[in-house]
Amino acid sequence: MSEEMKPYNKNILIAVDESENARRAVSYVAQLLGGAEGFKVTVLHVIPRPEEDFFPNEGEKEQWLRTYREKIEGILEEYMDILIRGGFKAGSVSTKSELRYCPSMAECILAERDKSHYDTIVVGRQGLSRKERFLFGSISNKIVNHANNCAVWVVA
Amino acid sequence: MKFTQKDIRELAARWLPSDRVPHHIRIHTDTSDFFRIEYDDAVILRGHPYLIRHNAKEGRFGVDEEVKFWVKRAVDLGDGSYKILKLVFYEKFKVTVGGIEFQCFRSPRKEARILELVGDHKNFMHGLSTEDEKLNIVRVIEMIKGKRMDSLIAETEVDHETYFHNLFPRIFQKYIECVEAIRFLHDHGEKHGDIRRDHILVDADTGSYRWIDFDFNYRHRENIYGYDIFGLGNILAFLVGKGDVLLHDLKKAGASCLENFQGEDMNIIFNNRVMNLRKMYPYIPKALNDVLMHFSVGSKWFYEDTSQLLNDLAAVIPSAKKSR
């Protein structure tokens, strides 16, 4: 089958953090596709595992992780509610949060996309200044530049 | 082996003049409280004794020297050589660069990993990591005989054009080696973490530029190496300009070139530093100036990795030859 004929699936990966733009990305998908048949949405948050010595001991690290997980699970539940209120069936929406060391968050998101076969990735634009993009890079830019064989929606 | 004061005195007597051999010696096998470890004390690390001399100091850019109590100069009582002992100091703090805040921390493990990774690479400081009895990771660094690279540049008493044509080509080669060394770290998944011009020493024996201090780390966002690359750009501008070229200094000197500069000619983070140095020194080859401009406000794109930077630096050499 030629590349042009690739059948795209209706699996959508929304990569989120706690920012307003991520919430906007979720709302966008809810409004655009809520009620439409066949779509499956996963809301993904990758917890960036801090490097060695960021915490001087395991106890502090565990405490940080517990607090972080509680916070992000609350946010993911809210995002799921937004999608269900928008018309998605509960069985078509799931959430996922994973602790990973991410030299590049964009590559972590793309790896998840490859693993679970989503043909659409949705992210909120972080709205970084040029200085910030220069110093730290932009996740959405990198996803747009590195993604293959899928659609990327950047919600600004 | 358990050392007594007498053992340490006997070992010290092999390497120190008799009047410098301490009479009373406190012996530490736990370095957790580094403030307690003072001049003439001994530290035993995995059975190896060191005699402490001074705390290290770090001065930077006209700021008074600050004592680093966790960094000690010491005599290795095994062979009499001077070493630097870096004891464990966990520190987490926020840094603001150009109005952007990010989190930094000291990582003894990172420095230990890098020391092992670089081995005897000519462009890095050398050393090993060991442990005290409480498993604190102590880094034992070999002393580098030589001066700070930026001090040597600042001491050069020739005008810019003479410097640029006669001295800079060799300095530029050394700089490229430094960037290649950073690429080596990045290729192995490590950041330097604190790339500054005062973190390069010029080895007096070999002439090599050598990176020092790897224990600094920052919480990266998307581009793990972005802050390192920013540091490399700052150093290049310093070397090409024979010092930082600051708007403030140009104004003070009433420089006529001042009116040529626009916002886009400035460093993207430090908006008072000139990156478009060719406007001031027209003999700077365009290819080299173009590299600098990728660190400027006016840049359309920024370097994402050291390979991109090295490719552009490699293109400078033939164009520099042509322009002479």
Image (cartoon, rainbow, N blue to C red):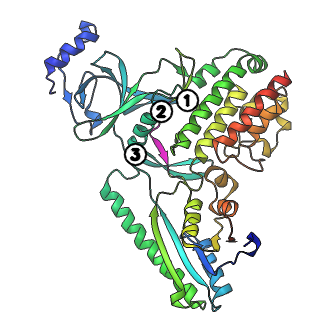
Category of crowding for the residue at label 2, using alpha-carbon neighbours closer than 10 angstroms: few (below 14), some (14–19), many (at least 20) = some
| Three-letter amino acid code of the residue under disc 1 | Asp
Q: Which of marks 1 and 3 is nearer the N terminus?
A: 3
Q: In which quarter of the image is the C terminus of chain B?
A: top right
In the rendered image, residue A74, in percent from the top left (x then y), is placed at: 45, 77
Out of B316 and B228, give the one closest to the viewer: B316
The residue carrying mark 1 is B198
Q: Give the range drawn in magenta.
A: B212-218
The residue carrying mark 2 is B118
Q: Distance between the residues labelled 1 and 2?
A: 20 Å
Q: Is residue B155 left or right of residue B55?
A: right
One can see residue B1 in this view? yes
Q: Is residue B2 left or right of residue B193?
A: left
Q: What element carries label 1?
A: helix
In the rendered image, residue A17, in percent from the top left (x then y), is placed at: 54, 69
The residue carrying mark 3 is B91
